[in-house]
Amino acid sequence: MNHFSFSFASTALSACVASLLSILPLSAAAQTGTCPIVSDADLTVALPDFQSWTLLSGGPGRCQFEGKVPDEDGDSWTLASLTLMQQYKSSPKEAAEIMQVMRTEFAKQYTLTEVKLAGAVPGAFRFNSGNVSWWYAQAGKSVLSVMYVGGQEQRAAPQEQGLNDILQKAVTATDQPAAAAAAGVCPQFDASLVRKLLGGKKVEIQQFGTTSCIASNPSSDALMFTGVETKNEAEAAQLFDSMRSDDCTNEALASLGPRSELSYNCSQGNKRASVSFFKDAMRYEYTLVMEGREPTAQERAQLIEQARLRFAR
């Protein structure tokens, strides 16, 4: 089942966005795009224990890489992954507020270590959980989040200096006006419909790579977009079943093809409405969350229209 359990109050929405990289799956984007934050060549130099680094998905706001090193028999591979995400706010003050929320929440469960990076606002930190390491740093009006998942072999353990070099490159790339401008638009959203759905108030849009976007307003209402790649019809059918929210009212949408649904009136998680459909080996989903209430019939109709515009492209 697919339940939303995020809190959408105050800076909590932004804090949840900043930690999305820890829950977005490796398959959440097609293996296309380029990374404006760091390159696979940068990773090959910084982390030479891995024979190769490949960009799985990349675009403004979010990049994900996979590293490979042969096992002793030479036939199989030990994998590692590195995910970088930029969340831009309207001011450094707002970014600092997100950092404080993240620091407070993570300190309840993990031991935080201070990290010093040139160009980053003092207060950057990291923490570990098993073979997974996280870093959070503020660069100007952005919060940079990095997640490294190391391989199981000893030689694939995190290389501190190499990771530090990558973090430094990421901070420098993040604190650039052009990077903020590119991440502040989402090709998957129709701007006029987004304003209608979010009440015509000040709307903030953030793109996280090519297949994830969030639009929100000061009331913490939010419209989210995600895309997940599938390999074939069988996988598409399995994904449809696994991501279907059975606690919701689900209605088929014939105009969006087979395995397309409108879901609303859910008994678990946040009050929300979602439209999902499959096209060109991708599963697309638009989800509308209105702070403290169910989306109305009119809002659900507008959500369907947003999905139809994407489906028609």
Image (cartoon, helix red, strand yellow):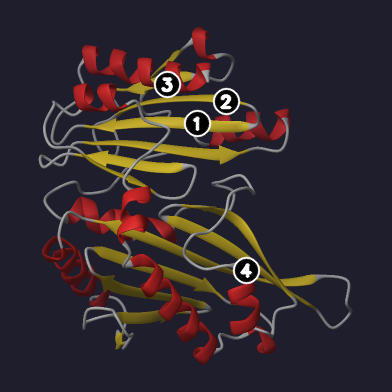
- First in residue order: circle 3 vs circle 1: 1
Quickly name the residue at label 4: 40
Between 50 and 19, the one nearer to me in the picture: 50
- First in residue order: circle 3 vs circle 2: 2
Q: Amino acid at mark 3?
A: Ala
Quickly name the residue at label 3: 307
Inter-mark Cα distance, 1 to 4: 27 Å
Where's residue 241, x and y in %? 56, 31
- First in residue order: circle 1 vs circle 4: 4
Residue at 10%, 39% (x, y): give it: 219
- 226 over 35 or under it: above or below: above
Residue at 51%, 38% (x, y): give it: 227
Quickly name the residue at label 2: 278
Inter-mark Cα distance, 3 to 1: 8 Å
Between 177 and 214, the one nearer to me in the picture: 177
Q: Residue furthest front?
A: 178
Inter-mark Cα distance, 4 to 2: 30 Å
Horizontal side of 191 relative to 220 (left or right) equals: right
Where's residue 310, x and y in %? 47, 23
Horizontal side of 240 relative to 208 (left or right) equals: right
Image quarter of residue 271: top left
Q: Are marks 2 and 1 in contact (CB under 8 Å)?
A: yes
Q: Amino acid at mark 4?
A: Asp
Inter-mark Cα distance, 4 to 3: 34 Å
Quickly name the residue at label 1: 284
Image quarter of residue 158: bottom right
